[in-house]
Every structure is written in C-alpha cells, then in structure tokens.
Image (cartoon, rainbow, N blue to C red):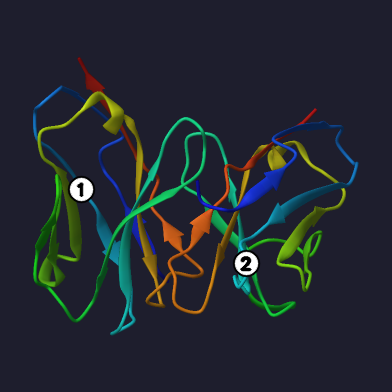
Amino acid sequence: ETGVTQSPTHLIKTRGQQVTLRCSSQSGHNTVSWYQQALGQGPQFIFQYYREEENGRGNFPPRFSGLQFPNYSSELNVNALELDDSALYLCASRGPYTEAFFGQGTRLTVV
Amino acid sequence: AQKVTQAQTEISVVEKEDVTLDCVYETRDTTYYLFWYKQPPSGELVFLIRRNSFDEQNEISGRYSWNFQKSTSSFNFTITASQVVDSAVYFCALSETNYGQNFVFGPGTRLSVLP
C-alpha cells in the first residue's frame, strides 16, 4: 500500500479525443511526477509538479499537460489522443524527505 | 544525456537459486543516485534500494544485495534464495536527487521464479 491512488484503472478512448487521469497522493507529498510506460518498456518521465507549479518536463509535446491541487491531488491531461498514447500512466508522489511512491497506474487504450 | 541499460530482457530461475540483475548507466553528472524498483503484475513500482554516486560500498539488506562499480558504470542487484513472490519486472533507475525525481528508467528485466 503506497498511499497513492490513481483513477480510473482502465480507460478506452478514441483517437483525437481528450482524456484526464487523476492521482491522489499522501498528505504532505508536495511533489508529484507522471510517467508513461509503453508495453514492455520502462517508464518515461512526462513532467513534475512541486507546490502546484511545473518544475520539470521530459520529452513530451504540449498536448500533455497537468495540474496539481492544494489537497495533494493531481491531474494529467492529454489532448488530441494518438494511437501511440496507449500506455500505462503512472503517478509518483513524494514528500521532502521520502522516496517516490508510485500508484498502480491507469491503463489507457486509444483506438 | 542520461541512459540506463538492462541487457537482460527475461530471466527464469528455480526457487531458492540466487539471481543477479545487471544494470549499466550513463551520465555526465558527478553526483547522481541509482535505484532499483520492482513492478509486480498489479502495476505499481515498489522501491527496493538506493545508492548515491559517492558511496561505492556494497551492502546487503535481507535477501537483497547490490554491487555498485563506478569504474564500469554498473549497479547490479542480487536476490539470494529467490522465492516465487519475487517474480516481477525489475527496473534500474537513475536520478539527480537523493529521493528520486525525473527518473531515467531502464527497459526492465522480467524475472520468473519457478517453484
């Protein structure tokens, strides 16, 4: 039990649509990161939020965006979905002096 | 650019055997942190171990041990007396911070421990 909850667990969307994935972190975890994990590959860093501000971004286009809220929840939004966006999306949160704790992920399928 | 390589795609062992997972990394940073995470079928990544770049002392923690060699940029992970519950995908990861952020993950090694 990591204390990081992601919803939904599975999602099917059509190419071109928009999707919002949600993550709920432990109290005090003011840093949240999102990762994309394609089938059979390692997770790839999308971006990170610290105190509601984006403070790091990987090699992902602007149609991947996020929000972090004061209640330690966060969102990943993806616009104009493409087939290659099909993946497991992982949220990781941590406090000032803790390791990163990962959620179980949201499996997104784009058809 | 940072990169992590795990040359072993899949490994199968019989229960109680020892198994070593290989990891080679690339970074230009002088200070960095290496991690091993386990991903069971449920999907979440579970933290196993962490090592910083200025401490090459190898350690043992229960059934886990690791061998960090800066000269060869390797950070290998060994499970002693493997158990069926160890079956999972194992990821080696590199981070610029002690507690891990902006991880660069390797492609993973799928470990199957057979009864």
The circle drawn on residue A49 is none
Task: Give the Cα distance between marks 2 and 1.
Answer: 29 Å
* Residue sitting at x 76%, y 51%: A22
Outermost top residue: B115
* Residue sitting at x 28%, y 85%: B30
Q: What amino acid type should be assigned to the residue bearing mark 2?
A: Val
Considering only vertical position in the picture, is B42 above or below B71?
above
Outermost bottom residue: B30
Q: What amino acid type should be assigned to the residue bearing mark 1?
A: Asp
Q: Are marks 2 and 1 on the same chain?
A: no
| Label 1 crowd bin: few (<14), some (14–19), many (20+), radius 10 Å | many
Q: Which residue is mark 2?
A: A32
Q: x, y (%) of residue B50? A: 28, 65
Chain at tag 2: A
Q: Which residue is mark 1?
A: B22
Q: x, y (%) of residue A71? A: 76, 68
* Location of the N terminus of chain B (image quadrant): bottom left
Element type at mark 1: loop
Which of A6/A39 is in front? A6
Q: x, y (%) of residue B54? A: 19, 81
Residue A65 location, quadrant: bottom right
* Residue B96 visible in the displayed image: yes
